[in-house]
């Protein structure tokens, strides 16, 4: 635009209708014994150290949420599980988990199970440090699940397009990485978790935006 280029078309990320509108082949709550009335928070991402798993654990374990479960799903999560239960730098978090009797499920799921988890979750929690345009947010929209995410990548823009979620309070470094403000993020999660109607409406708004603009069928035409 600065140099007068014309005919610019930005092609966004999206999610597949054949995955997210099909009848689920598995029930994630049944698979892991999660009660239907429990608040299910979901994080999806390969464990690399920068996708926000540790931050999600901190937010969840330090919060005062009751009858809630955090499900961390992604490749290499066996390493994260080992660290949480055995590594000294996770000692405080593990003690919090035990003292507050909070349930954390760390697992690796098939694609079918991951899609089912998106659809069954009450809130997608994604405090990632660095992203381009996080495809998991579009998948959350496709699943009618609202998201609470860091400002990594173009998350703010995705929210403006869809009204599908909320931004975690963050600071941004000059290298583009973002880091959550822990206490403010905990307060926001606690506030949102008490308003199931707002969660449902925001999830529906995201699904409507995805259906209109962010299915692969629509994007392919661009």
Image (tube, rainbow, N blue to C red):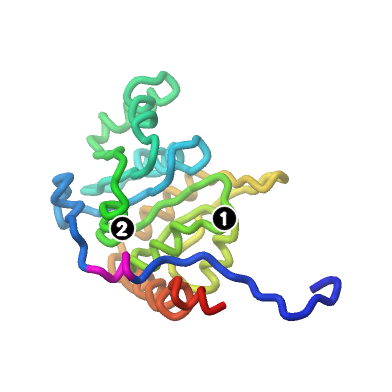
Q: Residue at 35% across / 39% down in the picture?
A: 61
The residue singled out by tag 1 in the image is 151
The quarter of the image holding the N terminus is bottom right
Determine crowd level at label 1: few under 14, some 14-19, many 20+ residues with C-alpha closer than 10 A.
many
Q: Position of residue 151 (x, y in %)?
A: 57, 55
Q: Residue at 45% across / 51% down in the picture?
A: 126
Pick whichever, 78 or 111, lies toward us: 111
Q: Position of residue 218 (x, y in %)?
A: 47, 78
- Can you say whether 47 is above or below 29 in the image? above
Q: Which label sits in the foreground, 1 or 2?
A: 2
| Prevalent SS, magenta region | helix
Task: Give the tally of numbered discs.
Answer: 2
Label placed on residue 1: none
- Can you say whether 219 is above or below 112 in the image? below
The quarter of the image holding the C terminus is bottom right
Q: Position of residue 10 (x, y in %)?
A: 63, 71
Q: Secondary structure at mark 1?
A: loop
Q: Is residue 20 located in the magenta-colored stretch of the structure?
A: yes
Label placed on residue 115: 2
Q: Residue at 67% across / 48% down in the picture?
A: 176
**Of marks 1 and 2, which one's residue comes earlier in the chain?**
2
Q: Which residues are magenta?
A: 18-22
Q: Quadrant of residue 85?
A: top left
Q: Is residue 133 located in the magenta-colored stretch of the structure?
A: no
From this viewpoint, which residue is outermost toward the front? Answer: 220
Distance between mark 1 and mark 2 Cα atoms: 23 Å
Q: Secondary structure at mark 2?
A: helix
Say whether marks 1 and 2 touch (CB < 8 Å).
no
């Amino acid at each position: 635009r600065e140099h007068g280029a014309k005919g610019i078309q930005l092609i966004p990320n999206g999610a597949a209708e054949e995955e997210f509108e099909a009848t689920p082949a598995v029930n994630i709550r049944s698979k892991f014994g999660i009660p239907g009335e429990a608040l299910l928070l979901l994080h999806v991402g390969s464990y690399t150290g920068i996708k926000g798993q540790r931050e999600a654990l901190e937010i969840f374990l330090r919060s005062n949420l009751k009858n809630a479960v955090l499900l961390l799903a992604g490749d290499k999560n066996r390493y994260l599980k080992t660290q949480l239960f055995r590594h000294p730098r996770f000692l405080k978090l593990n003690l919090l988990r035990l003292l507050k009797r909070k349930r954390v499920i760390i697992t690796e799921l098939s694609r079918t199970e991951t899609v089912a988890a998106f659809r069954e979750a009450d809130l997608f929690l994604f405090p990632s440090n660095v992203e381009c345009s996080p495809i998991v947010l579009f998948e959350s929209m496709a699943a009618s699940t609202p998201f609470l995410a860091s400002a990594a990548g173009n998350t703010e823009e995705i929210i403006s397009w869809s009204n599908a979620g909320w931004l975690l309070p963050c600071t941004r470094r000059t290298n583009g990485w973002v880091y959550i403000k822990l206490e403010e993020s905990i307060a926001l999660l606690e506030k949102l978790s008490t308003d199931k109607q707002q969660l449902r409406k925001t999830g529906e708004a995201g699904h409507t935006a995805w259906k209109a603009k962010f299915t692969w069928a629509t994007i392919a035409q661009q």
